[in-house]
Amino acid sequence: MPFPWEGPKKFIVRAEEEPGPWGKRPEERTVEELLRASIINLDKPPGPTSHEVVAWIRRLLNVRKAGHGGTLDPLATGILPVGINAGTKVLQALLHAGKEYVGILHLHGDVPEEKIREVAKEFVGDLYQRPPVKSAVKRRLRIRTVYYLDIIEVDGRDVVFRAGTSAGTYIRKLCHDLGMALGVGGHMAELRRTRVGAFSEDYAVTLQDVVDAYHFWKEQGIEEPIRKVLLPVETAVVHLPKIIIRDSAVAAITHGADLAVPGILQVQADIQPGQLVAIMTQKGELVALARALMSAEEMAIADKGIAADIERVIMDQSVYPPMWKKKVKAAESKDKEAK
């Protein structure tokens, strides 16, 4: 069972227009621009807390702000997205991203491998979970989704598994429940997070990679390593449905306006009211995170109205000019001429 956001994307085209000279494609940004807003796909080592790792990166890169997109236990390893400066604004998008883990479940008794594989299949789909006692959230019952739970290997009482889950799923609790279902009990012995949304271990960087890349750039002017470390903020919203807007609508949103229907050029066909969506320019730049107020079909045919409520502006106000000011000045000029 794949993550729900994977697969080809279909867009509904409302209108077409040539992009203007403002902004630039994410891959064209300078290193200085990336330091002002980017994401590091970090492979966290065992030992330090997620907070300690982020504090270390903030000091190393000499940046004002840094934050992480989902806590990992100190002993756990794997993907820890780290936002740099304005990149911290987009981390909330990862709260909705699916995650993948590889771990070891240690059973407290002997169970035939065939039974382990059969019972594991019963945990795929929606399940109820109550957060463990040592958690940072209220311990109320909640529904979480396991997209797949593959048994990789069984070695005695140790079961190596790979699980793809919705955000907020507790793997430690999943291991406990699987052990109980097998009738012998069990606990999570080891855990590695291999994926968060589009961030995977295939191109993750280590803390040493961050050190080396920064010094290569700072001392020798070599950019290639640090460009592999500092990823554009757009990589954090690959999993979100998208709305592509007119250049003339960008500045209004960065100055606090919600997205009105006339500003839309294209809309992803599966958007429904209440979904978190990414507002994008024609050049593929992330403008803001928003909550859809209409379905994609409604956005495509409506003449007016607010299509999405802006929750977090990501783009700097200086990137696109405030075109509504030109319209106001033009209108004022016409009024004067009429008088």
Image (cartoon, rainbow, N blue to C red):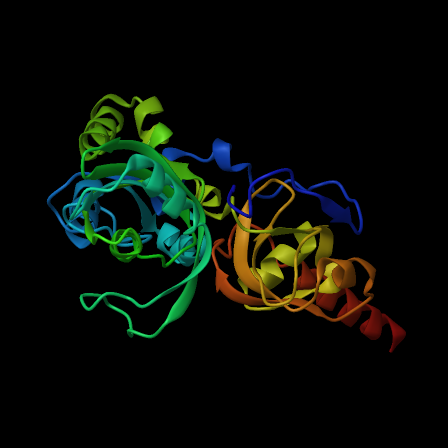
Question: 182 or 17: nearer the eye?
Answer: 182
Task: Give residue 301's quadrant in the image.
Answer: bottom right
Q: Is residue 149 above or below residue 27?
A: below
Q: Name the residue located 40 percent from the left edge and 57 percent from the top edge.
A: 95
Task: Give residue 104's quadrant in the image.
Answer: top left
Q: Name the residue located 30 percent from the left edge and 57 percent from the top edge.
A: 170
Q: Is residue 9 above or below residue 329?
A: above
Question: 111 or 97: nearer the eye?
Answer: 111
Question: 142 or 64: nearer the eye?
Answer: 142
The percent coordinates of residue 267 (x first, y second) are: 70, 52
Total marks shown come to: 0
The percent coordinates of residue 245 (x first, y second) are: 67, 52
The percent coordinates of residue 216 (x first, y second) are: 23, 24
Q: Quadrant of the C terminus?
A: bottom right
Residue 40 shows in this picture: no
Residue 138 shows in this picture: yes
Task: Give residue 277's quadrant in the image.
Answer: bottom right
Residue farthest to the bottom, as pictured: 339
Q: Is residue 104 above or below residue 209?
A: below
